[in-house]
């Protein structure tokens, strides 16, 4: 018995694609594009304007299938973001409104671009580099309380963020903090039958990457996000990332200078990590977290919480639940609303929304940063603002 098959001509295939209706995925033409607000590695953020039906929103556009590998990477990132974002609904997690797409036509070679549509947030914690933005102790507590609330929620739902950094923490004009950019997020599970997990350790931006990942650990969990939370918390006072290594080796050196050397006495089992014997790890460094951060923080409970967040051994690092119950959040001044402080800054301080500076403005900005660095105390044995 022979079977017959239908062979479509190229024109028929193109007509089929053009007429195809993606279920549950509206066309992006229903939104008004106001501005491109920057470029990131895993998508293109676009700001959409006010509309009768749709409030201001924030979109990530994922490139269409133009250049093999980049498309696979973008598509994989799209799927990776969708999985947790469709499950996570919390005040302190960015809200995915919908997915939309461009229509496949001859003009785009019958390839659609897909968009993730989020509620728009006016600011991110990149504003920490703006010296005109002043946080009171109560406001810092509010920022960290919301950040830890978000982490507690996603960890309770067995999701790891894996890219905690200041630029991925958004804030609305009303002072509501949102964890954003779930492009590296993944579900995690507790080890079963003694079998270790084998997650990639090539995650988390270098300056916020915990020591266990730098040493090759692939069997990790929520403590990797808590380390990033500690780096962000310290940054609330220092106003720049506290450990700015150019390489993984240098980052490990900075960590050991601040948190002490990697020894089995303070971190049992560290010598079993894959890269422990392969990296040149400095020995003889004592832990100096409290001493180095106390001049900036000036709040004993804040210093104590930072010390617990920046513990080398991930098993001893404080979790989000315990951190939220720390005395830092339950002593005067209590966490205070951010909206009053943010109302003084009418221009958005969202990292991607900042317009390009003109050459003269850039020179003034660079000179201002030089002056700021010169005014800070110097330490021959330590890099200022880089612990």
Image (spheres, rainbow, N blue to C red):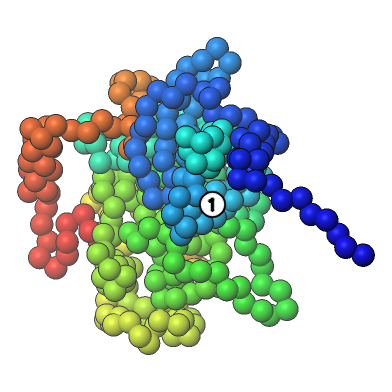
- Tag count in the figure? 1
Q: Which residue is mark 1?
A: 75
Image side of residue 365 versus residue 46, left or right: left
Q: Residue at x 28, y 56 (%)?
A: 242
The foreground one among 113 and 279 is 113
Q: Residue 306's spot in the image, x, y percent?
A: 39, 55
Quarter-wise, where is residue 15 in the image?
top right
Image side of residue 181 versus residue 251, left or right: right
Quarter in which the C terminus is drawn: bottom left
Q: Residue 49's spot in the image, x, y percent?
A: 45, 20
Describe the element under mark 1 as helix, strand or loop: helix
Quarter-wise, where is residue 99 in the image?
top right
The foreground one among 211 and 183 is 183
Q: Residue 293's spot in the image, x, y percent?
A: 28, 55
Quarter in which the N terminus is drawn: bottom right
Q: Residue at x 31, y 48 (%)?
A: 235
- Depicted 212 relative to depicted 20: above or below: below
Q: Residue at x 47, y 57 (%)?
A: 68
Name of the residue lying farthest toward the bottom: 277
Within-10-Å neighbours for mark 1: few <14, some 14–19, many 20+: some
- Can residue 202 be seen in the rendering of this structure? yes
Image side of residue 338 versus residue 386, left or right: right
Q: Residue 313's spot in the image, x, y percent?
A: 46, 71
């Amino acid at each position: 018995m022979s079977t017959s098959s239908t062979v479509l001509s190229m024109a028929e295939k193109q007509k089929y694609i053009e007429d195809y209706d993606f279920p549950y995925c509206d066309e992006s033409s229903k939104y008004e594009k106001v501005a491109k607000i920057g470029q990131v590695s895993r998508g293109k953020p676009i700001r959409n304007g006010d509309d009768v039906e749709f409030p201001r929103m924030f979109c990530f556009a994922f490139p269409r299938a133009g250049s093999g590998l980049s498309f696979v990477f973008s598509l994989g990132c799209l799927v990776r973001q969708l999985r947790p974002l469709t499950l996570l609904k919390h005040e302190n997690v960015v809200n995915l409104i919908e997915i939309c797409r461009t229509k496949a036509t001859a003009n785009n070679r019958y390839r659609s671009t897909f968009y993730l549509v989020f509620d728009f947030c006016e600011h991110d914690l990149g504003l920490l580099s703006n010296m005109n933005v002043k946080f009171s102790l109560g406001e810092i507590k509010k920022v960290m309380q919301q950040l830890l609330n978000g982490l507690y929620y996603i960890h309770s739902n067995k999701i790891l963020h894996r890219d905690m950094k200041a630029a991925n923490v958004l804030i609305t004009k009303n002072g509501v903090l949102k964890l954003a950019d779930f492009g590296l997020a993944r579900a995690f599970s507790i080890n079963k039958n003694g079998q270790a997990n084998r997650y990639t350790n090539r995650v988390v931006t270098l300056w916020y990457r915990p020591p266990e990942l730098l040493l090759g650990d692939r069997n990790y969990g929520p403590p990797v996000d808590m380390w990033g939370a500690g780096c962000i918390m310290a940054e609330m006072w220092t106003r720049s990332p506290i450990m700015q290594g150019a390489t993984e080796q240098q980052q490990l050196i900075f960590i050991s200078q601040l948190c002490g050397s990697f020894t089995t006495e303070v971190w049992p089992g560290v010598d079993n990590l894959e890269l422990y014997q392969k990296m040149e790890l400095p020995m003889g460094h004592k832990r100096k977290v409290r001493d180095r951060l106390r001049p900036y923080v000036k709040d004993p409970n804040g210093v104590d919480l930072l010390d617990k967040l920046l513990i080398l051994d991930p098993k001893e690092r404080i979790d989000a639940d315990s951190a939220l119950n720390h005395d830092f959040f339950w002593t005067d001044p209590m966490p205070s609303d951010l909206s009053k402080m943010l109302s003084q800054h009418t221009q958005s301080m969202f990292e991607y929304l900042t317009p390009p500076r003109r050459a003269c403005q850039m020179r003034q900005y660079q000179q201002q940063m030089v002056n700021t660095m010169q005014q800070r105390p110097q330490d021959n044995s330590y890099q200022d603002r880089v612990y």
